[in-house]
Amino acid sequence: QVQLVESGGGLVQAGGSLRLSCAASGRIYRLDFMGWYRQAPGKQRELVARHSGDGTRIYADSVKGRFTISRDNAKNTVYLQMNSLKLEDTAVYSCYAHLGSYDSDDYDYWGQGTQVTVSS
């Protein structure tokens, strides 16, 4: 079974930094996109950043210049370095992966979500 396990959320003061990690495990034969979405209370889920297999990275306009997504293909792990955090970055951050697994016909997988809270 494929699993996405996240870590690194928590409470941080505005202006601070956090680093999120997401590791994909299971019998994976292809890993395409890995990325992060977030959902704040009362708001729709939005894409934060995504890293494609060819190295292409995309970011939400609201995080450009502050967040950096990176990936370790050997570990099937994606990271989100979040700097200069703002109150409006407070949300549940969920890891997403589009991949191929020997054990399933599914291609889309989600992590359990990790809370990021930015305080003033």
Image (cartoon, rainbow, N blue to C red):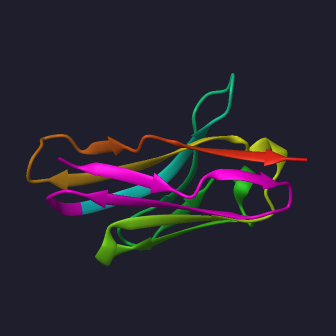
Tell me: 4 left or right of 22.
Answer: left
Task: Answer whether residue 6 is magenta in the image.
Answer: yes
The residue under the point 28% across, 49% down is 3
Specify whether 43 is left or right of 86.
left
User: Is 2 drawn above or below residue 40 in the view shown?
Assistant: below
Q: Residue at x 19, y 40 (%)?
A: 106
Residue at 26 percent of width and 58 percent of height: 25
* Residue 96 position in % (x across, y down): 41, 48
**Location of residue 19 in the rendering, given as x and y in whole percent from the top left corner:** 61, 64
Query: Looking at the picture, does residue 77 appear above or below residue 59?
Result: below
Report x, y in % for residue 51.
46, 63
Task: Looking at this view, name the residue that lies furthest to the left.
Answer: 102
> Is 118 placed left or right of 52 in the picture?
right
Report the magenta residues as a range. Answer: 1-30
Which quadrant of the figure has residue 117? top right
Residue at the far right in the pictured view: 120
Location of residue 35 with respect to 57 vertically, above or below: above
Residue at 37 percent across and 61 percent down: it is 23
Q: Quadrant of residue 26?
A: bottom left
Residue 28 is covered by the magenta coloring: yes
